[in-house]
Image: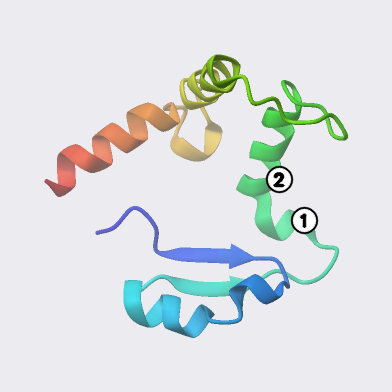
Amino acid sequence: EGAMRTLTWDQGREMARHQRLTQDTGVEVFFAHPHSPWERGTNENTNRLIRRYLPKGTPITSHQPYLDAIAYELNNCPRATLGYRTPTEAFNQLIATTH
């Protein structure tokens, strides 16, 4: 079992080769309807969390220690979609069970 079984994407040309992605990885690709962010709930929630640190419209800093601190906090915050585990815990558990 891999880390990802499906992918829901916006309607963009960057996914023009989605069939190749599915063929190569087994990850099934779905497309969200235009103007329907609720169809990509985890993505929208993650964007909301990131905006706490980097408000929309502000330039993203190139100060790597700050970006690393943001990543650390986000990866160590419990998420309902992960059964209140942190992304770090979920990832480590996945790695432990697949290797």
Q: Residue at x 60, y 74 (%)?
A: 15
Of 87 and 56, which appears nearest the observer?
56
For residue 53, side relative to residue 64 (left or right): right
* Quarter of the image where one finds residue 35: bottom right
- Mark number displayed over residue 44: 2
Mark 2 crowdedness (10 Å alpha carbons): few <14, some 14-19, many ≥20: few
Q: Residue at x 74, y 22 (%)?
A: 52
For residue 52, side relative to residue 78 (left or right): right
Q: Are marks 2 and 1 in contact (CB under 8 Å)?
A: yes
Relative to 56, is 7 above or below? below
For mark 1, give the secondary structure: helix
Alpha carbon of mark 2 to alpha carbon of mark 1: how far?
A: 7 Å
Going by the numbered disc 1, the residue's amino acid type is Pro
Q: Residue furthest left?
A: 99
- Mark number displayed over residue 51: none
Q: Position of residue 2 (x, y in %)?
A: 29, 57
Q: Residue at x 67, y 50 (%)?
A: 41
For mark 2, give the secondary structure: helix
Of 77 and 73, which appears nearest the observer?
73
The quadrant of the rendering that contains the N terminus is: bottom left
For residue 80, side relative to residue 85 (left or right): right
Q: Residue at x 77, y 72 (%)?
A: 33
- Mark number displayed over residue 37: 1
Going by the numbered disc 2, the residue's amino acid type is Glu
